[in-house]
Amino acid sequence: MAQWPDGHDLWQLWSEAKNRVPVKLGGGVWPQWDHNFAEKCILEFHALDPSSERLRYLWEKKPVERDSFNPLRVVWD
């Protein structure tokens, strides 16, 4: 049975995609995409939420000391 990871390391997933996607699609397609913008977004999300629990769930599984004056909450409604 497959073991699920505790989190989703966005930077690791992006690094893997950057290596695999250009090879799979061919060298002509990758430069047409705005992957630099996507990478910037991923870096910002990863800096805020390295385990990717903070932005996906209402609460984190492992409590982490955060700045109480600057909480980060996502309302999906």
Image (spheres, rainbow, N blue to C red):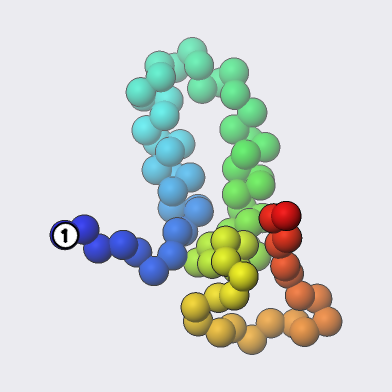
With 64 as the anchor, is 25 left or right in this view? left
- Which quadrant, please, contains the C terminus? bottom right
Instruction: Name the residue tied to disc 1.
Output: 1
**30 left or right of 33 in image:** left
In which quadrant of the rendered view does residue 71 lie?
bottom right
Which residue is rendered at x = 51% and y = 22% of the image?
A: 30
In percent of width and height, residue 50 lies at: 54, 65
Mark 1 crowdedness (10 Å alpha carbons): few <14, some 14-19, many ≥20: few
The extreme left residue here reads 1
Decide: is 19 above or below 48: above
The image quarter in which residue 58 lies: bottom right
Query: Going 43% across and 65% down the picture, which residue do you hit?
Result: 7
Image coords of residue 66 (percent x, y): 69, 82
Furthest toward the right, the residue is 69
x and y percent of residue 52 in the render?
53, 62
Instruction: Check the picture and name the quadrant holding the N terminus.
Output: bottom left
**Image: 31 above or below 42:** above
* Rendered position, 17 above or below 55: above
- Depth order, front residue of 62/26: 62
19 is higher (above) or lower (below) than 56: above
- Is residue 70 visible in this depiction of the protein? yes
Residue at the image point whose x is 40% and y is 43% from the top: 16
Which secondary structure, mark 1?
loop
Which amino acid is tagged 1? Answer: Met
